[in-house]
Amino acid sequence: MVINKINDVSVSLNNGECGFKLSQSENSAIQEECTHYEDMRAASIEALKIIQKNRGWVPDEAIILIAKMLSISVADVEGVATFYNQIFRQPVGRNIIRYCDSVVCYLVGYEKIKKKLTYVLNVKVGGTTSDNRFTLLPTCCLGVCHKAPVIMINKDIYLDVVPEIITKLLGQYL
């Protein structure tokens, strides 16, 4: 019953109601994920991840579509999307650089790391390089405070980072 309702809503939205169209594989994957949840609010994170996996980010129109598909409020989906810092609400570069800005990293010099990253990449925090290779984002904690300062590039974590290695480190992701 829920699957048919989800499918009907997505088809009508795909015909122009919100301007965002799911691919058939995205639609099928979201429907499949929904079978695992009684509460569709819980399924919304999976729907967001499916869209991001295929498109690299989640546009506003996708939030509206997910809400309608799952018969939940746009505010519920928006709340999930903004709570998880791994859901990107704007286009990002091919490589995501996260620098830890926790108290521990601050005490051992993350500001120097941030300054070097913004200089080498020629972007502000939150920005993406002009060639779309890198996006620079702060993160609250990467969980390895005993090896601070720390940065994460995609899924790779680098410990005891010093400004002098930044250029060489970024070169591995070109």
Image: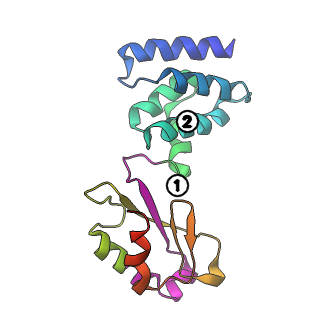
Q: In this view, does 58 lie to the left or right of 119?
A: right
Q: Is residue 150 one of those drawn in magenta?
A: no
Disc 2 designates what residue? 50
Residue 143: which disc? none
The answer to whether any part of residue 71 appears in the image is no
Q: Give the range drawn in magenta.
A: 88-115
Residue under the image location 47 percent in, 23 percent down: 23
Seen from the viewer's position, the closer of residues 94 and 174 is: 174
Looking at the image, tell me whether mark 1 or mark 2 is earlier in sequence order: 2
Disc 1 designates what residue? 85
Q: Is residue 156 left or right of residue 112?
A: right
Quarter in which the C terminus is drawn: bottom left
Quarter in which the N terminus is drawn: top right
Q: What element carries label 2?
A: helix
Q: What element carries label 1?
A: loop
CB atoms of marks 1 and 2 within 8 Å: no
Residue under the image location 43 percent in, 38 percent down: 55
Amino acid beneath label 2: Ile
